[in-house]
Amino acid sequence: MFKALEIIKPFWYFHVTNQKQRPWPDPENIDPVLPLDKGYDSKISSRLDGSFILLMNGWLPEKDKKKQLPESELKHKPSYNDEFRFLGKYFHPSWSLFYFLYCIFKLKNPLYVIIGYMRSLKINRISIFNKLTKNNYPTGSISSFPKKEKIRIIIPTYNRYSVLKNILTDLETQDYPNFSITIIDQSNPFDKIFYNNFKLDIYLIHQDNPGLWEARNKAVIKSNEKYLAFLDDDSRISHNWLQCHLECLEKFDADISAGVSISVIGAKIPANYSFYRLSDQLDTGNVLLKRHVFEKCQLFDEQFEGMRMGDGEFGFRAYQEGFLSISNPNAKRIHLKTKKGGLRELGSWDALRPTNILKPRPIPSTLYFAKLHFGKSTAYRYLLSSIPFSLNPYFLKNTIFGSFLSVSIVILILPILVFQIMRSWSISNDMIRKGPIIPELIKK
């Protein structure tokens, strides 16, 4: 596949293929056939381009292996001309420049690199999402899902009673009424009386020591339902949220309905949040999955305690095991990103923005995830492609001015930044030596 994708999307599930997960379609073996770009040096590069477009636009795996790219083509190494053509077509010009500098830094043949980069400057950028009709299946009533099936909704909370009130109020209005809620309350002070205000079936667990992944694991172990949903406490949902998740599982015979999270601050809403597609992430702030996924993959890795990407790592294990996870555009939640309480109170706004300049950057769990499943080379690429753009305020994330500001700050505080990175690398090495901490879930 295109090497540049490993820089743009270093932790992308679809970099990994096996007999259980082969997500790359054959663009010449679908109906209708997708026209290929003949501007590439290699026919295989053209097919890889078409396969990427199909996957990005909602193609879903089929049982017919003939409709998937063979492993030999996925291992193809495109020329530098093809790499830069691919980048120039679909990504911001800054990525072409970054990949050019990366190749020079890696001591690749400078002549081929320069020629490939210069040719890409003449390519007109096009949208990844403008070629196909998306598989926007209409919503409707659930035809075969047993109404008697009870759903377990799991919500950890930490010092957030004011926003927790909102999500519980939203749950009172759900169209699908057959559910119970497990709340793992880690607040200090703990207010048990608070829960008397809601007409909901709530099973309350009081946990003295704050721990997000321990809390979710504990709730799963104490449950016995076949379907488990997860929500963050600082969320808002519509009346059909649970209904939309159940519809997704039924329509696609899926194992996981991965809902989309729309943030009130930070990045813009991605274009691929508007249609069903094969999911490349799992967000425990908004997801519904079948219990047998946990029985096969076991629980969340508690090495991520106090840090991030525990859900992404679990999602990757589910992907490796061949479970079908669908990104569900209709099961939305508004992520309030409340400043008080929650994980941010324990240490970070996101994986690249610690709350204290003396804390490690990035959060060590990201490097642990990279080394555990993708190798150290991916961890290095992640640092090179992300750290220079992580110094801007969160509200300027993914903006041109924010990127320029971040690079400027990097130059000014480079010694501090190097210290932060080295500390994060060392902690992640310790995590790797200890290995995953995954409690056992006994099949019921």
Image (cartoon, grey):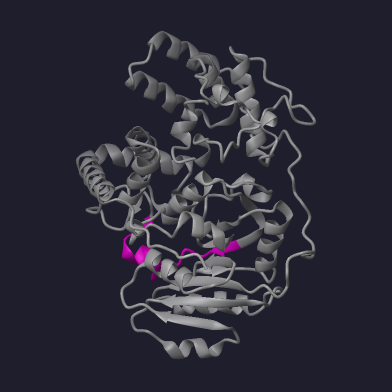
Q: Position of residue 394 (x, y in %)?
A: 42, 53
Is residue 236 in view? yes
Is residue 391 in view? no
Q: Nearer the viewer, residue 379 or 415?
A: 379
Give the residue displayed 70% in from the left and 73% down from the top: 176
Q: Is residue 376 above or below residue 213?
A: above
Left or right: where does residue 242 sit relative to residue 311? Answer: right
Give the residue displayed 51% in from the left and 28% down from the top: 93
Left or right: where does residue 237 sit relative to residue 311? Answer: right
Q: Is residue 245 above or below residue 403?
A: below
Q: Nearer the viewer, residue 412 or 437?
A: 437
Q: Residue furthest top?
A: 111
Q: Which residues are magenta?
A: 333-349
Q: Position of residue 172 (x, y in %)?
A: 63, 80
Left or right: where does residue 226 sit relative to residue 159? Answer: right
Q: Position of residue 355 (x, y in %)?
A: 31, 58
- Asked if residue 341 is among those painted magenta in the image, a careful observer would answer yes
